Amino acid sequence: MKLSEIGERKIVESLLKRFSIPFDDCAFIEINEHYLVLTTDMVYEKTHFPENSKPYDMGWYSVAVNLSDIASKGAEPVAMLVSFAMPRKMDKRFFDEIIDGMEDCINNYGGKIIGGDTKEGDKILISIAAIGKVRKEEAMFRRGAKIGDSVYITGKIGKGLFIFSNEKNKILHVKPRIKEGRILAKSKKVSCCMDISDGLASSLHQLMKINNVGFEIYEKNLPVADIAKKINNGIKKAIYTGGDYELLFTIPDKYGKILERKIDIKKIGKVIEEKGAYLISKGKRREIKNIGYEHFK
Amino acid sequence: MKLSEIGERKIVESLLKRFSIPFDDCAFIEINEHYLVLTTDMVYEKTHFPENSKPYDMGWYSVAVNLSDIASKGAEPVAMLVSFAMPRKMDKRFFDEIIDGMEDCINNYGGKIIGGDTKEGDKILISIAAIGKVRKEEAMFRRGAKIGDSVYITGKIGKGLFIFSNEKNKILHVKPRIKEGRILAKSKKVSCCMDISDGLASSLHQLMKINNVGFEIYEKNLPVADIAKKINNGIKKAIYTGGDYELLFTIPDKYGKILERKIDIKKIGKVIEEKGAYLISKGKRREIKNIGYEHFK
């Protein structure tokens, strides 16, 4: 059977099972009173970068998506290993601009390149392994959502929809929520957290499965990016499209209200006992389906 | 200027300079009395795997080359993040056999897959970030060679020459020298160490530059793989060809002699004051040139 008939999620599931790896954005290594959190994300010219993307944006993006995983744990970035596959005919200036983008992202959000690898390849591929650090009692996980908790999100959803616009390159301008993640972590009140890189719908379903709960999401509360407002059926598309690197988290309501005053977060729903993800819109309750971006499919 | 006009080593050098990264196989993170050593190696269908390579061998090799870097520090493998780019049309069984090879290599030499990423790509690419652990006082570095030290090597050189034979797949049967590395490290007498993945000649030149010393290598002492003996000019080719994942290290002579009784190592030369790498062969002294495998060139 071909990988395209199976899909990324099933492939990953079979690997996690085989190696007894917990399903999460990051791996954890215990070091005294801290966890080192480790994550790796590979970005590839063909599947991640819109045509004619600027090298600076590619570099920025490749670092930002890794830092987003670090942010979702409440960790601060420590170090990263950066590997490139690049065509022989690539111009050195093009390469230097990729590095410029990486460096600026690191200067904005933290971390340090401490090693890597460069190899020849037909297309540009950047594979980064990033390491973060968080005190054990502050770490946020995908597991932990409690029935009755409020569901919150940072920033706005729908920025991934730039892919359908004339400003496709904007999907690469990801802002990893490191600062927000640290503030959430320090509160020690967040019950579960993940980034919504595969889309809000897919993320809710992943949290549902891990936590054995359901979600009610209020459409009127959803913070929606301007681009989504301009598009037909934009809110629906924003819910199902990947490419937003915001943090989705659950927290007891009273603590959520306190954090609202400190950072740009919005309450979008609540954790319910009934399994399923539901969108409440103008008094109607509709199912949010398990659809999102997936490789190989 | 194109990358092919610059070459991998110059590209890497410019990155190391820009990010103040020390030139080594691994990065080090201090954790109390240990170093975590981190390394990453990317292997690519087109440049690393002979045609018709077995998926099992690809998986084994991708893990083994990373563990070889860990071994060169004297560290024990702890964990790894494994990322794949794979074609949609790849058969699931082919993929499973890659994983079988990885798992067997890990079961033989240590470590644990704790996370990763899977993406779609035109060709098979495996990027691994591996983490090892070593007590600070045991860690081995590239810097440290002393004039008068003996030069040693584990195993045999020339196994990379299988690439010119009918058994090309054997270049993938890399045995990372984890056990040997640990024994060398525990002796605390090794003054510098690296693996010779780019070839013995290139490795000597790299150590020369870092340590500001020279090397005299005795041809008659070189442990040469059978494949090199069958090939015209085999010893010379073995010196200049990459693909051997042996440990090259320097150590005061008396301690080298003690270690010879414990593991398969051979004294091949000595560290000299005069800059340059020289091969002593039948009383003649010839320069070993700085030639080895390099991407983009």
Image (spheres, coloured by chain):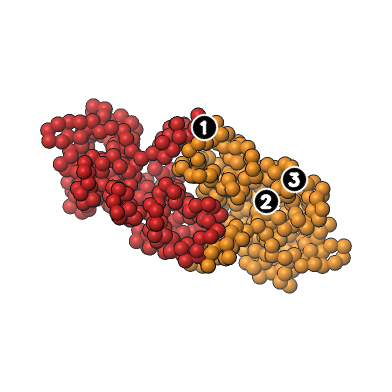
Chain colours: A orange, B red
Q: Amino acid at mark 2?
A: Gly
Residue marked by disc 3: A165
Q: Nearer the viewer, mark 1 or mark 2?
A: 1
Q: How far apart, in angstroms, are the residues tagged by discs 3 and 2?
A: 14 Å
Residue marked by disc 2: A243
Residue drawn where x is 26% and y is 27% of the image: B275
Asked if B282 appears above or below A75 in the picture, the reply is above
Looking at the picture, how far across and down is residue B291, in whole percent?
Answer: 32, 35
Say which element carries label 2. loop
Q: Chain of mark 3?
A: A
Between residues B140 and A292, which one lies in front from this camera angle? A292
Looking at the picture, how far across and down is residue A3, in whole percent?
Answer: 54, 62
**Lower sequence index among marks 1 and 2:** 1
Direction top: furthest residue: B274
Q: Amino acid at mark 1?
A: Lys
Q: Chain of mark 2?
A: A
Residue marked by disc 1: A92
Q: Amino acid at mark 3?
A: Ser
